[in-house]
Image (tube, coloured by chain):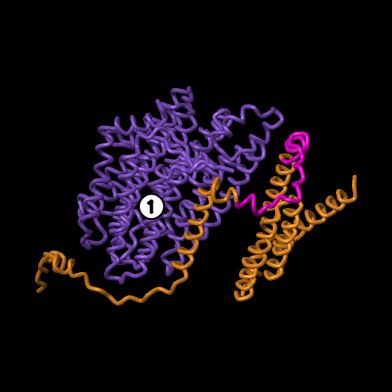
């Protein structure tokens, strides 16, 4: 029996990430508390190395390796680059917080890197086994990270909820995948897409049922209604840097899973999954925006806003056109940047063990730190979808895709709820600019975080003024 | 029907029914130790089913790993914890209707989906019996490090994650002494330390 030798060059980014994670694990144990900065330096250095390799690989044509279990294509590369960038920034913002709150730093970084590895595996999967393993590798380190702050009962509760929910979601997804395997007798996603049209009519109900299970699994992971219950509790219960991690990069990976399974795997069933996703997206947009209005906890508000945003992202996916897919990817990338900025400001504001998490805590931010308030304003307005900012163009993209497939009513519904959503974002802005601060403790944060958060906030503005290049990259990822 | 055939059928139905019964016992037992033991039973009978499918390696791995290692450990944990499960059972009756409804729904779906018209012998031919020289372990060994090397390594990384998380969650917290941050001390400005407040002077009361 012979097997083709896998092309290891294609998985070089993953290999470097894994190798460095293992090395850092060893190095970190031997370092004293004062020298932990070496761990941090190594982590960021390896992420930069991964980025460089990904950039060099960017234009590789679609190639399969590892017995066609691993696919490298433009879509994967685009998503991977953005995820690594996001994680790099997350580590940068969290450094100070972790030190002050005595969260084990080495473990945080290593678990974060391994979770990133899971995301990268998930993004370039072409096989049910690696899809499942990537998903677990993405989720399990995050659950451990949520529980890392052991004194906090709230964090432990959030971790348990997260664990039970994701185990349930994995179980449902596996059930769907095993039914698919039973019918098509293949684990390969591309191969499955070729076998499905040849199945007999009698198999159709089973196919439909497995599709339902798969869609439920995907929606659990990205947190869309009615599978969103874990999201607000996890966001509010986890320490700020971990919320930052959970809320940003995994969303891109979740979308990648959806695209791989539904778009590459079941293109013939797009009418069926379109119908399912319309219901889920409409519920997410409605419930997310309405419940967010009633929140006084800023993290919970952002959790519900993330549910609504995932609904908007699904709108692009359910259009089932090249334009829709690229709009969904564009949405996910920009949303990750916006969520990163919003939670990063919370991380920066949390000093000396005091967790900033209520909208009240942001009161009068403008008089305490005008620059941070301005960046927060940019990010919140972008999330609301106000014109010169990036968030506006993401919404335009998905709505344009919806109109392209004549789902006008859904487009109108989406816009209507976007207007309702404006209220709670603007309410936070009002608190920041027109209220008196409750404390006047000076806000100090290190220079690197200052530069990074400025880049992050201004990126949202610059991307809003010049959205073309990223949109073109998203289009190119789908060969359009 | 030949005699071995009948024996095979009897063994199959017996173990299948036992798997279901012990599965129900896992959740119905009042004593958690008994629940864990029922789970062991379920594993053993699932292993019998694996043997009937001629995957001896998986059957043995199930017994060795799950029954031998995981469940023993689990039993220790259950015995060491002084659990009061009465409060947990308090809501049992309250949640019973919804639980039953979902179980019946899932069961109906499963029976419908795995019914003969979808996965029957007419759709999928019965697998042939392997020859006596066929070695399950050898076949697995052939593909594990060649065709399935990528998922195999990923599973290993998953175990690493489990180890790192378990240690970082269980290791006692190192009590640190309070450290000064010299950089912040040098960078401190007058405004951070002293706040000048204009207190309006009180009117003199005569």
In this picture, residue B81 sits left or right of residue A420: right
Indicate yes or no whether the magenta region holds residue B140: yes
Q: Mark 1 points at which residue?
A: A17
Depth order, front residue of A300/A132: A132
Residue A95 to residue A198: above or below = below
The x and y percentages for residue A363 are: 28, 54
- Residue at the spot 22% in from the left edge and 61% down from the top edge: A440
Tell me if A5 is positioned left or right of A378 in this view.
right
Report the front residue among A206 and A2: A2
Q: What element carries label 1?
A: helix
Residue B115 sits in which quadrant? Answer: top right
The residue stretch that appears in magenta: B114-141
Q: Which chain is orange?
A: B
Residue A114 seen from this side:
yes
Residue A113 in which image quadrant: bottom left
Q: Position of residue A201 (x, y in %)?
A: 69, 27
- Identify the image quadrant of the N terminus of chain A: top right
Q: Where is residue B40 in the image (x, y as percent from the top left)?
A: 70, 64
The secondary structure making up most of the magenta span is loop
Chain A's shade in the image?
Answer: purple
On the image, the x and y values in percent for residue A230 come to: 50, 52
Q: Which sits in the foreground, A195 or A103?
A: A195
């Amino acid at each position: 029996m012979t097997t083709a030798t896998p092309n290891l060059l294609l998985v070089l980014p993953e290999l470097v990430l894994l190798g460095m994670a293992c090395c850092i694990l060893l190095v970190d144990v031997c370092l004293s508390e004062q020298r932990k900065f070496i761990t941090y330096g190594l982590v960021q250095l390896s992420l930069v190395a991964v980025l460089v390799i990904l950039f060099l690989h960017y234009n590789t044509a679609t190639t399969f390796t590892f017995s066609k279990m691993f696919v490298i294509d433009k879509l994967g590369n685009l998503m991977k680059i953005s995820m690594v960038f996001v994680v790099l920034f997350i580590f940068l913002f969290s450094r100070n917080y972790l030190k002050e709150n005595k969260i084990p730093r080495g473990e945080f970084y290593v678990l974060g890197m391994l979770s990133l590895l899971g995301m990268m595996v998930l993004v370039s999967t072409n096989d049910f086994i690696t899809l499942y393993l990537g998903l677990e590798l993405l989720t399990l380190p995050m659950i451990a990270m949520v529980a890392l702050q052991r004194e906090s009962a709230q964090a432990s509760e959030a971790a348990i909820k997260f664990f039970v929910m994701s185990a349930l979601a994995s179980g449902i997804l596996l059930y769907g995948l095993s039914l698919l395997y039973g019918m098509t007798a293949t684990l390969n996603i591309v191969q499955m897409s070729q076998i499905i049209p040849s199945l007999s009519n009698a198999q159709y109900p089973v196919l439909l049922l497995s599709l339902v299970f798969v869609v439920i699994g995907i929606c659990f992971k990205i947190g869309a209604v009615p599978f969103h219950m874990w999201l607000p509790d996890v966001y509010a219960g986890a320490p700020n840097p971990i919320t930052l991690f959970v809320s940003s990069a995994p969303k891109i990976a979740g979308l990648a899973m959806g695209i791989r399974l539904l778009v590459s795997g079941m293109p013939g069933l797009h009418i069926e999954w379109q119908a399912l996703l319309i219901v889920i997206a409409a519920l997410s947009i409605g419930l997310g925006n309405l419940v967010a209005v009633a929140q006084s906890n800023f993290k919970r508000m952002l959790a519900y806003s993330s549910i609504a945003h995932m609904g908007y992202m699904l709108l692009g996916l359910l259009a089932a056109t090249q334009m829709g897919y690229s709009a969904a990817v564009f949405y996910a990338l920009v949303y990750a940047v916006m969520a990163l900025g919003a939670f990063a400001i919370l991380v920066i504001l949390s000093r000396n063990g005091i967790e900033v998490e209520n909208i009240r805590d942001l009161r009068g931010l403008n008089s305490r730190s005008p620059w941070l308030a301005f960046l927060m304003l940019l990010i919140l307005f972008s999330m609301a979808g106000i014109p010169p900012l990036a968030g506006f163009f993401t919404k335009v993209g998905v709505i344009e895709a919806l109109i392209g497939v004549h789902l006008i009513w859904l487009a109108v519904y989406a816009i209507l709820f976007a207007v309702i959503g404006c209220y709670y974002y603007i309410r936070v802005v009002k608190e920041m600019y027109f209220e008196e601060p409750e404390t006047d403790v000076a806000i100090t944060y290190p220079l690197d975080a200052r530069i990074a958060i400025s880049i992050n906030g201004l990126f949202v503005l610059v991307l809003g003024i010049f959205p073309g290049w990223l949109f073109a990259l998203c289009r190119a990822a789908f060969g359009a | 029907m030949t005699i071995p055939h009948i024996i095979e059928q009897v063994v199959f139905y017996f173990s299948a029914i036992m798997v279901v019964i012990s599965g129900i016992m896992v959740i119905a037992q009042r004593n958690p130790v008994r629940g864990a033991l029922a789970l062991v039973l379920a594993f053993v009978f699932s292993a019998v089913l694996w043997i009937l499918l001629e995957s001896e390696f998986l059957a043995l791995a199930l017994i060795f790993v799950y029954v031998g290692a995981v469940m023993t450990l689990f039993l220790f944990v259950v015995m060491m914890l002084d659990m009061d499960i009465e409060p947990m059972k308090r809501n049992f009756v309250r949640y019973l209707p919804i639980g039953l409804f979902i179980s019946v729904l899932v069961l109906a779906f499963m029976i419908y989906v795995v019914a003969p018209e979808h996965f029957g012998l007419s759709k999928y031919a019965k697998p042939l019996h392997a020859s006596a020289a066929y070695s399950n372990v050898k076949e697995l060994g052939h593909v594990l490090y060649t065709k399935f090397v990528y998922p195999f390594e990923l599973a290993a990384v998953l175990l690493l994650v489990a180890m790192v998380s378990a240690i970082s969650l269980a290791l006692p917290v190192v009590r640190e002494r309070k450290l000064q941050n010299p950089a912040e001390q040098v960078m401190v400005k007058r405004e951070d330390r002293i706040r000048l407040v204009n207190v309006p002077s009180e009117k003199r009361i005569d």
